[in-house]
Image (cartoon, rainbow, N blue to C red):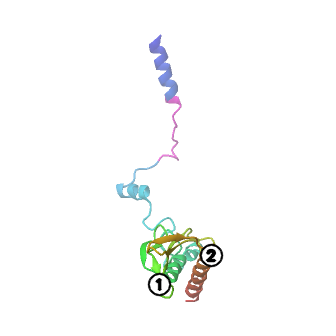
């Protein structure tokens, strides 16, 4: 009895399989074609465009990075007066070292800039500003930063990014 049940269960499970018709059957291909189809393209699904391209690629600055090229370049240009600790173009993060303005001794600033999108948008860049002041003992103490200063830096970067985009569109 158990054998009959086991044979019937195997037959029922076998019947659940998909039967390929002649039109659905795939013909054998060369190994190179199978490997190419499984891996995809080196240049992505859009391929390599030498004489133009889509508007999304133009808006992103036509770069292979994970961030907008105009925002990246504008951020580097805007913060160029400060020493950089880290600049990661794939993650879109720029971290500066502490900078003390020669005209305002006893105050120093540090900036972290994050580029958040591949598109050139108003919310595509985020600035975090840190400020320290030298106290009477000679130690640096954290000071509250005016948030409007962060916003002014973001606006300066966005303005520069728009200028770079207009300049490239005119070429």
**Secondary structure mostly taken by the magenta-highlighted segment of the chain:** loop
Q: Which residue is rendered at x = 46% and y = 18% of the image?
A: 6
Quarter of the picture containing the C terminus is bottom right
Q: Is residue 72 magenta?
A: no
- The answer to which of 143 and 53 lies nearer the viewer is 143
Q: Is residue 159 above or below residue 92?
A: below
Q: Position of residue 94 (x, y in %)?
A: 47, 72
Q: Which mark is residue 117?
A: none
Query: What residue is disc 1 on?
Result: 81
- The answer to which of 43 and 22 lies nearer the viewer is 43
Please give left or right for residue 106 compared with residue 119 in the image: left
Residue most extreme to the front: 136
Q: Is residue 74 visible?
A: yes
Q: Position of residue 90 (x, y in %)?
A: 46, 68
**Label 2 packing within 10 angstroms: few (<14), some (14-19), many (20+):** some
Q: Which residue is rendered at x = 53% and y = 31% of the image?
A: 16
- The answer to which of 103 and 99 lies nearer the viewer is 103
Work out how far the residue at label 2 is from the one at label 1, CA to CA, in angstroms. Answer: 18 Å
Q: Is residue 64 visible?
A: no
Marks 2 & 1, CB-CB < 8 Å contact: no
Query: What residue is disc 2 on?
Result: 151
Q: Secondary structure at mark 2?
A: helix
């Amino acid at each position: 009895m158990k054998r009959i049940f086991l044979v019937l269960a195997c037959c029922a499970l076998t019947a659940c399989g998909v039967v390929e018709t002649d039109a659905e059957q795939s013909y054998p291909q060369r190994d190179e074609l199978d490997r190419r189809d499984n891996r995809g393209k080196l240049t992505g699904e859009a391929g390599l465009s030498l004489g133009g391209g889509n508007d999304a690629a133009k808006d992103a600055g036509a770069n292979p990075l994970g961030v907008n090229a105009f925002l990246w370049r504008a951020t580097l240009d805007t913060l160029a007066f400060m020493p950089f600790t880290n600049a990661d173009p794939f993650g879109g993060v720029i971290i500066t070292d502490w900078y003390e303005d020669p005209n305002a001794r006893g105050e120093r600033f540090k900036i972290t800039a994050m580029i958040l999108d591949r598109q050139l948008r108003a919310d595509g860049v985020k600035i975090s500003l840190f400020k320290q002041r030298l106290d009477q003992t000679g130690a640096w103490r954290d000071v509250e930063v005016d948030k409007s200063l962060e916003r002014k830096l973001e606006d300066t970067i966005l303005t520069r990014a728009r200028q770079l985009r207009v300049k490239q569109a005119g070429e």
